[in-house]
Image (spheres, rainbow, N blue to C red):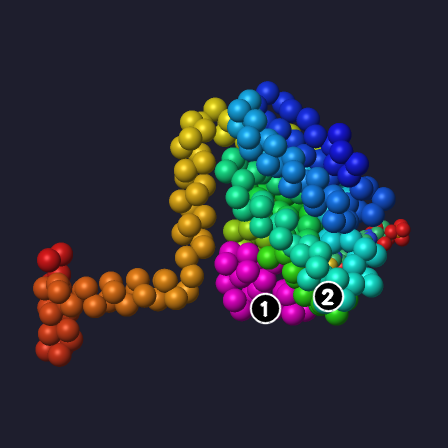
Amino acid sequence: MGKYICVWKEKEVAVIQLNRPKVLNALNRPMVDEIVEKLEYFDRDETVRVIIITGNERAFAAGADIDEMANDNPITLEKLNQFAVWDRIALIKKPIICAVNGYALGGGFELALNGDIIFAAENAVFGFPEVNIGVMPGAGGTQRLTKVIGKVKALEYIWLGEPMSAKEAYQYGIVNRLVAPELVFEEAMKFAQRLAKQPPLSLRLIKEAVNKAVDSSLVDGLQLERKNFYLLFASKDQKEGMQAFAEKRKPNFTGE
Ligand code: CAA
């Protein structure tokens, strides 16, 4: 039990429950520190194979704590380096499942996007409302949302700050499973227990490899694309394809 979170274990699954219900689990700085410290603790604990992060029925988390940062300025923020702690979540090797009921807004959405798998209530609400308070996402939202749903839709949501329904989030591939609100935690736990029976080393190396795919930069991606484009000019099929085009006939590709 921390000041702002509760933790427990169910067999080989560890649970971190955000626990500031009066402010819809608004994430103040000490709370984020507690979450990250516990994630790292469970990542080292050999009796734990999967980690669930959850909130309560009203909110996963309604964002960073607005009261805490209302009087910040660029210098206080730079000195605090408040978002550096978030980078440590990406280093957690074990699977993280987020079980989301209610609001997952701003930093709450960013926390969910930092996990690996999201189980959400059918009536959960995601979104980046920061623009409505004159700022923008600061804990990875512009990057992580864009990588999942693409530039045009990410811009629309982050520019307008409008809520994204759980159904939309499911359609965009953000959410793995839509579940009746009262079953979200139970279903996430069932999934976690299934994962806990898989070979742990495979899971961690798969997570690392899949994250690598997501993380390649556009520059790296473009270079690979270009190299592969050039390489295809070594194939007979390229000659055949372009010749057939010139001769206005169907190509006959042989795979050479
Ligand atoms: N920070 C601080 N307090 C918050 C909060 C937040 N992000 N979200 C909600 N609360 C508090 C409210 O101030 C209220 O406290 P009081 O009872 O003391 O007044 C309590 O939680 C309950 O909230 P509401 O009465 O507003 O509940 P509601 O059901 O009417 O509305 C809501 C719910 C739509 C989520 C609304 O609370 C809201 O808009 N919250 C702010 C959402 C937001 O802007 N999040 C982004 C924060 S910035 C950020 O996250 C930056 C980043 O990238 C890290």
Residue 39 x %, y %: 61, 37
The amino acid at mark 2 is Ile
| Most distant residue in the front direction | 79
The answer to whether 53 is drawn above or below residue 172 in the figure is above
Asked if marks 1 and 2 touch (Cβ < 8 Å), the reply is: no
Is 150 included in the stretch rendered in magenta? yes
Residue situated in front as seen by the camera: 223 or 99 = 223
Mark 2 sits on what residue? 75
Residue situated in front as seen by the camera: 66 or 24 = 66
Query: Which part of the image, by quadrant, shows the C terminus?
Result: bottom left
The amino acid at mark 1 is Leu
Whichever of labels 1 and 2 marks the residue nearer the N terminus, that label is: 2
Ligand 1 placement by image quarter: bottom right
Horizontal side, residue 144 vs residue 63: left or right: left
Horizontal side, residue 129 vs residue 197: left or right: right
Point out the frontmost of discs 1 and 2. Answer: 2
Residue 178 x %, y %: 60, 43
As helix, strand or loop, the secondary structure at mark 2 comes to: helix
As helix, strand or loop, the secondary structure at mark 1 comes to: helix
Mark 1 sits on what residue? 155
**Residue at image x 42%, y 27%?**
199
Horizontal side, residue 233 vs residue 157: left or right: left
| Residue neighbourhood size for the residue with mark 1, other residues' Cα within 10 Å, grouped as few (<14), some (14–19), many (≥20) | some
The answer to whether 247 is drawn above or below residue 251 in the figure is below
Q: Which residues are magenta?
A: 141-165
**Residue at image x 13%, y 56%?**
255
Q: Secondary structure of the magenta portion, mostly? A: helix
